[in-house]
Amino acid sequence: MYNDRIYLTPQEILEKEFKIDARGYRPQEVDKFLDMIIRDYTEFNSIIKKYEKEIKDLTDDNNKLKHEILILKEQLEISKSSENKNVNPTNIDLLKRISQLEKVVFGKEN
């Protein structure tokens, strides 16, 4: 996802060699700073992977809940269209469950 926008890997930073000029920076300071950057990059990569997995898991859960809502709505329609038009506890339970699932999936507060 982010690989097309990130130019350097921690390994590339570690292996980078700089030419030393007569009036250049102190190599020890540069190395110390680059070590800090490498640690940050490594941590950022692990955070990104963790969040990508979490997004995938939540998306999967959301899709399962949406599918369950569709099934319950179909069951409700079948129940409504049956010859027995009386309101029974099963219909009420289905309506309550659909309502609760819609609140979870769509974030509705009723």
Image (spheres, rainbow, N blue to C red):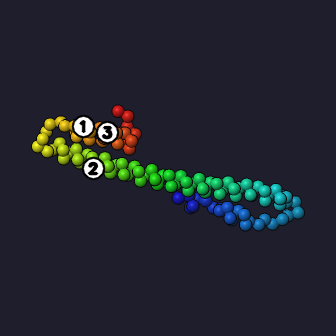
In the depicted structure, whether residue 86 falls above or below residue 67: above
Query: At 55% from the left edge and 54% from the top edge, which residue is drawn?
Result: 50
Residue 41, x across and y down, in percent = 66, 56
Q: Earlier in the sequence, mark 1 or mark 3?
A: 1
Pointer 3 residue: 99
Tell me which corner region of the image, top left, top right, bottom left or bottom right, holds residue 9.
bottom right
In the depicted structure, whether residue 38 falls above or below residue 72: below
Q: Earlier in the sequence, mark 1 or mark 2?
A: 2
Task: Inspect the image, locate mark 2, and give the three-letter code of the amino acid beneath it.
Answer: Ile
For the residue carrying disc 3, how many other residues have a C-alpha within 10 Å: few (<14), some (14-19), or many (20+)?
A: some
Residue 71: assigned label: 2
For the residue carrying disc 1, how many other residues have a C-alpha within 10 Å: few (<14), some (14-19), or many (20+)?
A: few
Tell me which corner region of the image, top left, top right, bottom left or bottom right, holds residue 22.
bottom right
Q: Do the residues bearing badges 1 and 2 touch, measured as CB atoms within 8 Å?
A: no
Of circles 1 and 3, which is in front? 1
Circle 2 — which element?
A: helix
CA separation, marks 1 and 2?
16 Å
Pointer 1 residue: 92
CA separation, marks 1 and 3?
11 Å
Task: Inspect the image, locate mark 3, and give the three-letter code of the amino acid beneath it.
Answer: Ser
Q: Nearer the viewer, residue 87 or 52?
A: 87
Q: Nearer the viewer, residue 29 or 49?
A: 49
Query: At 41% from the left edge and 51% from the top edge, which residue is drawn?
Result: 61
